[in-house]
Amino acid sequence: DVQLQASGGGLVQPGGSLKLSCAASGFTFDDYAIAWFRQAPGKEREAISCISSSGESTYYADSVKGRFTISRDNAKNTVYLQMNSLRPEDTAVYYCAWGYVDYVSSLPYEYDYWGQGTQVTVSS
C-alpha cells in the first residue's frame, strides 16, 4: 500500500523556520515526483512546491518562492520542505502528495495519494 507520512509541523514565530518531511513507501520512490500542498481554513488547497523524480526540476508557488526549498533523499524515500522566513499567512495544514508522474506538476488531480497532513502555525 502507498503511504505518505508528513511530519515536522508546529508552532513558530514569524520569521522563523521549520523543516517538513514526507516519508513514502509502497512505490518505487525515485521514479516519481512528489509535491507539497497546503490548505488554510476556508481556502482552497494550494500547490506550493514539487520536485521531479530525479530532483533536477522543481516548482514553487510565487507565494513561497525564495523562502521555501524542496529536496529529496531517494536513499531514504523522503522529501523535505525547508521553510524559512515564515509568515502568518503560511499557517495551514501541509500535505505531501504522490501520483504517477515523474515531472513537476502543481495540479491536484495528477496526485492520487495524499499524506495525513501536518499543521504549521505561524504566530507570535
Image (cartoon, rainbow, N blue to C red):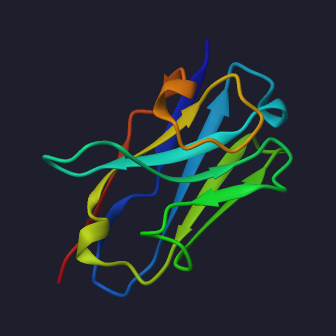
Quadrant in the rendering for residue 34: top right
Report whether 101 appears left or right of 123.
right
Most distant residue in the left direction: 42
Question: Height in image: 88 above or below 39?
Answer: below
* Residue drawn 17% across the image and 84% down it: 124
Report whether 121 appears left or right of 56.
left
Most distant residue in the top direction: 1
* Residue drawn 32% across the image and 63% down it: 10
* Residue drawn 27% across the image and 82% down it: 13
Which of 43/7 is in front? 43
Image location of residue 98, percent across then percent down: 60, 30
Report whether 75 appears left or right of 6.
right
Which quarter of the figure is the N terminus placed in? top right
Quadrant in the rendering for residue 4: top right
Quadrant in the rendering for residue 88: bottom left
Image location of residue 57, percent across then percent down: 78, 55
* Residue drawn 70% across the image and 22% down it: 100
